[in-house]
Image (tube, rainbow, N blue to C red):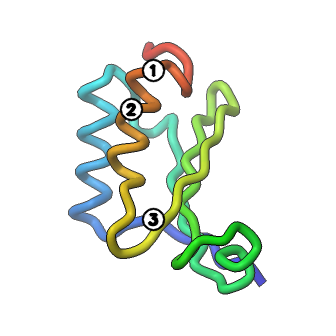
């Protein structure tokens, strides 16, 4: 059974919101969820599950490796800069 929950503690959530705002995006337009189930980790070959980021207004969604030492935050930043979630409004 997959368990999706907020991806990060309040401090990290605030950092994601700040990242989105710094790129001109509305944080409320995004959902960030984490799946740490063994099933998803094994099926994707990830050590600790995945973080999924979805933009509601466009339906764009990306999945990043989660866990200690992961770089999902930096990858999200790069994807925003490269237009992977569409244009900021």
User: What whole-number distance in Å separates the C-alpha atoms at marks 3 and 2?
Assistant: 18 Å
Q: Residue 50 location in percent, x, y?
A: 57, 65
Q: Residues within 10 Å of mark 3 (few under 14, many from 20)?
A: many
Do residues under tags 2 and 1 come within 8 Å of each other at their CB atoms?
yes
Q: Is residue 86 left or right of residue 9?
A: right
Q: Residues within 10 Å of mark 1 (few under 14, many from 20)?
A: few
Which structural element holds mark 2?
helix
Q: Residue 27 location in percent, x, y?
A: 40, 38
Which structural element holds mark 3?
loop
User: What whole-number distance in Å separates the C-alpha atoms at marks 2 and 1?
Assistant: 6 Å
Do residues under tags 1 and 3 come within 8 Å of each other at their CB atoms?
no
Q: Is residue 25 left or right of residue 45?
A: left
Task: Look at the image and tell me in which quarter the C terminus lies.
Answer: top left
Q: Nearer the viewer, mark 3 or mark 2?
A: 2
Do residues under tags 3 and 2 come within 8 Å of each other at their CB atoms?
no
Figure check: 23 above or below 67: above
Question: Which disc, if any, is residue 7?
Answer: 3
Q: Is residue 11 left or right of residue 68?
A: left
Q: Is residue 13 left or right of residue 32?
A: left
Question: Which disc, if any, is residue 15?
Answer: none
Task: Look at the image and tell me in which quarter the N terminus lies.
Answer: bottom right
Which one is earlier in the sequence, the residue at label 3 or at label 2? 3
Residue wearing tag 1: 82
Front residue of this view, candidates 2 and 43: 43
Q: Residue at x 51, y 35 (%)?
A: 29
């Amino acid at each position: 059974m997959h368990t999706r929950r907020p991806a990060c503690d309040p401090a990290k959530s605030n950092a994601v919101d700040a990242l989105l705002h710094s790129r001109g995006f509305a944080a409320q337009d995004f959902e960030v969820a984490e799946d740490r189930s063994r099933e998803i980790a094994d099926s994707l070959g990830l050590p600790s599950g995945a973080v999924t980021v979805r933009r509601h207004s466009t339906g764009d969604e990306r999945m990043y490796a989660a866990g200690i030492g992961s770089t999902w935050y930096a990858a999200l930043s790069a994807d925003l800069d490269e237009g992977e979630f569409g244009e900021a409004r």
